[in-house]
Amino acid sequence: MDVLMLSRLQFAVATMFHFLFVPLTLGLSILTAIYETMYVRTSDPDYKRAAKFWGKLFLINFALGVVTGITLEFQFGTNWSRYSKYVGDIFGSLLAIEATLAFYMESTFIGVWLFTWDKVRPGMHAFFIWLVAIASNISALWILIANGWMQHPVGYVMRNGRAELDDFMAVVTNKFAALEFLHTVSGAYILAGFFVMGVSAYHLLRKNETGFFKKSFSVAASFALIFALLEAFTGDASGVEVAHTQPAKLAAMESHWETGSHVPMYLFAIPDPANEKNSVETLPVPDLLSLLAFHDPSAEVKGLKDFSAADRPPVTLIFLSFRIMVGLGTLLVFLAAFGWLKRKDIERYPGYLRLMMYAIALPYLAIETGWVVAEVGRQPWIVYGVMKTADAVSILATSQVAVSLAAFVALYSFLGAIDFYLLAKYARKGPIH
Amino acid sequence: MLETIWFILWGVLWAVYFMLDGFDLGLGSLMPALAKDEKERRIIYNAMGPFWDGNEVWLITAGGATFAAFPVAYAVMFNGLYSALLLLLFALILRGVSFEFRGKIDSPGWRSLWDACLVIGSFLPALLLGVAFANIFQGLPIDNEGVYHGTFFGLLNLYGIAGGVLFVVMFMLHGALWLAVKTEGVLQGRASRFASRLWAALLVTAVLFLVLSFLATRLFDNYLKMPLLWIIPAAAVAALILTRAFMLRGAYGKAWMSSAATILFITFFSVAGLYPDLLPSSLDPGYSVTAFNAASSQLTLKIMLGVALVMVPIVIAYQTWVYVFLRGKVTEKDLAYEEAY
């Protein structure tokens, strides 16, 4: 393998691992803040215990999210230095804004929140966790504005042999980025909702602290359902945006080869990229792809054959990832809806509760596959239409990157296993009396 | 003009990072020497607990500001110093998780594992940052394309190692003083005795480093051109002397602040000597990456300056508030607190 492929793998490892922790941080910070606010409002001690219990799990998860986040910033310089030089004028500033606007606030007030349960009034203490929750979500906003710019670059001019900022507001108000943000945070909230529902299900099945966990479950079910429904809308809007801005990605998502209008969607297909066709495609729904991509049943949808083989992303991986994401997203709506409808006596549905324990894994899988669609689907571009990934990589020896990749895999596996173990241990232990 | 302002800001961000994270990196490195039992180790963890994460963000920001204002410098530095920076990163990762993981399983072996991670994860970054910056001061082997022609072990030259030792000693003194501020009784006494020895060590290392800087770097060129700049090293010396004076009076809070000022002025001293270079080239001064040939567009520099002028004071304000609000000593009562480390 060469430096390019190793660097791509290393980035994939670092990002996908980082994103095992980020969504729960984004969502569980808000849920913890909601529980603590309910405590302030109602003085019900169960909600204080809820804030402490879910807050503890939040922190175990948060630690790895923070330390693995630094890796990403570093890697743009270490492994993608030509990218950094070429687009740093825009991309670097977005990362720096993220740090000053959000990361300080998050990292400073998490410590304050943790150490001041008995030092400040309850309202003030709840305010601290809200600061953490808001800051982590602002952080996501700026990171996704940066990623949105890589997906659909706007507001720049080519000057002095690089991309230079021309219109800051255009970069900040990039519609692609806005949709990405909404889709990503909604996904994160769903994940956090399922995490809380799943852990609560474990205890409800064991009749442990039923009152406590019903309260947690009920809030989480409403939270997850709202965002699972919203996710469908932002997903649909994102699809339309991709159809307009990244036609090759859209074609890969559907393994759609021939340009045409009134394009159907095949409910079952097996891509055969070597022969530029699908080896199997059945169960067509007439006009559906045209309708989904452009909200017009007669719209023309570009096929992969319109792009030279070198300009196509890897079809099978994207096609499969997209199907998994959409399938899981749909399933999550039904699971959340059932939980919400039966939230008043959810302990009477042990089959559902058992299912929900295992369903914690599903939003993780949906989110990771979603990112595969977004990032692998952008290939061969690192900045769509502006810079190829192959032109972005650093000047390094293969051995350097091979060693660092091996070190990342070893360190991350070790830490990931420990974090998973600790999350499971403290989730099983339940709240303190 | 904007380039110069950003050069100064760049120096300030690194200086504040060294000043803040310096004490927790130093205290982490010193832990095996300072703490004799589990209770004392926990006091040390809790003395840094609420602060280390907010401190480390200054590193992210210093890196981010380099990326935003001087993308070429960011690219050349991070690509060139690949192995050293990834080692730094791994160390910081291990340190970061040790706070969260250590107390989560009640077993001495488990705790020793994370204590070791804290110590290595604190010592290695202090050393590597010193080695990296000393090598930057004396010039990196970079060509006219910004391609780095050195090796990782090439960084471990005499001046590089002197820089590493300087950072380690400077941070350890800063950390020992912090512990003296945050504790009382036996532990405070021990921290204070260590601080006295470290102060003497810092004096020797700093003088040595200055002499070596004179021999190995071009840092003094700016001082010969602009004698007014000598105020900066003079301030560093004054702060160092004040540190000792306050220590002798048992005024550890003021001693810590003087030590913070020492770190700030030592950083400013080198940054002022470096200007306008960000990464001087040891192959040919003409290949150096400077604030001018590495800078972002005027528009980006302007917008980022606006962001920095608004946000950095706000950050400093709330971080100062946190330090003041959580200023008390860490006692056994604090260890009984259910969320304590």
Image (tube, grey):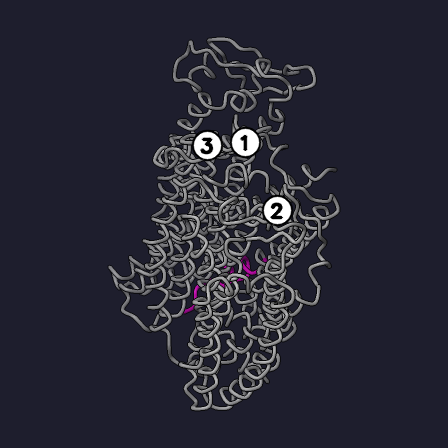
The mark nearer the N terminus, 1 or 3, is 3
Depth check, mark 1 against mark 3: the one in front is 1
How crowded pointer 1 is (Cα within 10 Å; few <14, some 14-19, many 20+) is rated as: many
Q: Which residue is located at x 49 percent, y 50 percent? A: B66
Q: Check contact, mark 1 vs mark 3: CB within 8 A.
A: no
Q: In the rendering, at what x and y percent does residue B118 appear?
A: 59, 69
Relative to B144, say whether A136 is above or below.
below
Secondary structure state at the residue bearing disc 3? helix
Q: In the rendering, at what x and y percent does residue A329 appear?
A: 47, 34
Point out which mark residue B287 bears.
2
Residue A385 lies left or right of residue A103; in this view the side is right
Residue A339 occupies quadrant: top left
Point out which mark residue A330 bears.
3
Asked whether residue A347 is in view, the answer is no
Please give the chain letter of the residue carrying mark 2: B
Residue A276 occupies quadrant: top right
Q: Which residue is located at x 45 percent, y 79 percent? A: B238
Relative to B142, say whether A334 is above or below.
above
Point out which mark residue B1 bears.
none
Report the magenta residues as a range: A421-433
Q: Are marks 2 and 1 on the same chain?
A: no
Task: Pick the residue in front: A124 or A68.
Answer: A68
Task: Pick the residue in front: A367 or B273.
Answer: B273
